[in-house]
Image (cartoon, grey):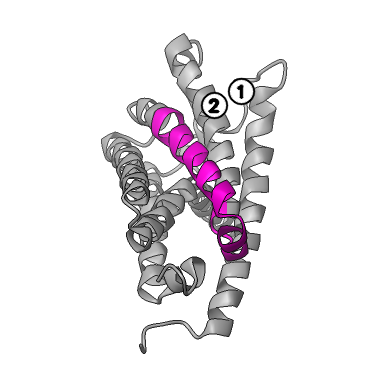
Amino acid sequence: MSNLLPKKLAQFTALFLLLLGSFFVLIMLNIALPYLLPPFPTDIDFLANKEDYLTQDAFYMSAFYTHITSSCLVLALGLPLFWPYFLQKFPLWHRRLGRYYSYLLLFLAAPSGLIMAFSGSGGIWAKVAFVCQALLWWALTAQAFRLALAKNFRGHAAFMIRSYAFSLSAISLRLFSYLISYLRYQYDIPCPSESFPYLCFPQIYVFEAWGSWLFNALIAEILIAKGLIRLYLGPKMN
């Protein structure tokens, strides 16, 4: 079929995605670790832009710590799940890790992300973006899990690609934010809101909030359309 990736290119794509995913996991661990070590600071990076009443709210902070911990584990567990060699040589471990990935995401990462979304920065439309992201993340993963139980492996693989694309949206959000910050400093654009330097332009943050997962969803659909699933499943499962 003309829309299939050539085998060598598909293998290279899979290896590239594995290495890229590993790099992203290390980035997320580097971001999350300072929050999890004493004295558990609330005045750095993400929390620095939150109002004091949120950082002093036990419910919100519980959701925050649950989210960053479970999301890092989800990202790490997803790496071997998308390694074709691991799937084809260790199917039992693939199923076990897949269950851990699904349970962590469905019961911890996505629900805690939804709780945080209602207090998201950037105004109502940014909040809507984060709520939609959390709900879709949960729904895509639930569908992937259901299809695995039904032994519909092609459908399962497609929805797992979509699920992991949403798992990586936190990375995309930061990449967009860093790019905007770089352009602002490169062209010496003054920040109209010195109180919240990371949210200089709320309208742009709305774009980042939507783009962080829409961009990933588009990439996932392209990879699915180009036949990457055939490489992951191998000839016996196609």
Query: In the image shown, does 49 or 174 lie closer to the viewer?
Result: 174
Q: Which mark is residue 43?
A: 1
Circle 2: is it few (<14), some (14-19), or many (20+) Cα within 10 Å? some
User: CB of mark 2 within 8 Å of CB of mark 1?
Assistant: yes
Q: Amino acid at mark 2?
A: Leu
Alpha-carbon distance for marks 2 and 1?
Answer: 6 Å
**Residue at the extreme right of the image, as rendered:** 38
The answer to whether residue 98 is magenta is yes
**In the rendered structure, which segment of residues is drawn in magenta?**
81-110
Q: Amino acid at mark 1?
A: Asp
Q: Secondary structure at mark 2?
A: helix
Where is residue 59? Give x, y as percent. Answer: 43, 13
Tell me the quarter of the image containing the N terminus: bottom left
* Residue 155, quarter of the rendered image: bottom left
**Residue at the extreme bottom of the image, as rendered:** 2
Residue at x 47% of width, y 46% of height: 167
> Is 116 situated above or below 3?
above
Q: Main secondary structure of the magenta part?
A: helix
Residue at x 28% of width, y 41% of height: 132
Residue at x 54% of width, y 26% of height: 47
Tell me the quarter of the image containing the C terminus: bottom left
Q: Which mark is residue 144?
A: none
Where is residue 31? Give x, y as percent. Answer: 64, 38
Where is residue 206? Give x, y as percent. Answer: 35, 45
Residue at x 71% of width, y 15% of height: 39
Residue topped by disc 2 = 47
Query: In the image shown, does 70 or 84 lie closer to the viewer?
Result: 84
The answer to whether residue 206 is magenta is no
